[in-house]
Amino acid sequence: MAQKKLPSNIEITELMLVKAGDDFTRTFMGEIYRETTIDGNPIVRGKVVVNEGKIWAAGETKEELGKYLDDICTLKLDHNLHLIPGVSIKISGVDYFEN
């Protein structure tokens, strides 16, 4: 009798290291999500928690995404990106800062 295959509870997540500038002491672990646009083009999205804030970015390649996340990480840590007053919206009771 053939054994019935049970669904797996394992979820695989692709990770990447995000750093501020050339300083490897300021590194953070980010998650990568790969998708395809309606036109069939690949897109790579990523998110990373940097201290008390979360940053998101998207690019066409993992390298492009990494550059965007590194740059935003540097802006947050060195230039107080999230402390700049700006526009925020509330989604499901959570404030999101739009910059």
Image (cartoon, helix red, strand yellow):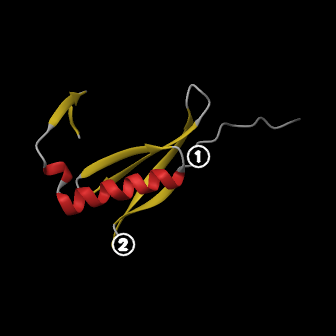
Which of the 4 quarters of the picture holds residue 7?
A: top right
Q: Is residue 94 above or below residue 18?
A: above
Q: Quadrant of the N terminus?
A: top right
x 62%, y 30%: residue: 40
Mark 2 secondary-structure assignment: loop
Residue ID for mark 2: 22
Q: Label 2: few (<14), some or many (≥20) within 10 Å?
A: few
Q: Residue 89, image x and y in percent? A: 19, 30
| Residue hosting label 1 | 10
Mark 1 / mark 2, whichever is N-terminal: 1
Residue 62, position as x, y percentages in the image: 53, 52
Disc 2 marks a residue whose amino acid type is: Asp
On screen, residue 81 above or below 7: below
Res 93 visible: no
Q: Which quadrant would residue 88 be assigned to in this image?
A: top left
Instruction: Tell me the crowding category of disc 1: few under 14, some 14 to 19, or many 20 or more residues within 10 angstroms, Cα based.
Output: few
Q: 18 above or below 23? A: above
* Kind of element beneath mark 1: loop
Query: Label 1 vs label 2: CA separation?
Result: 35 Å
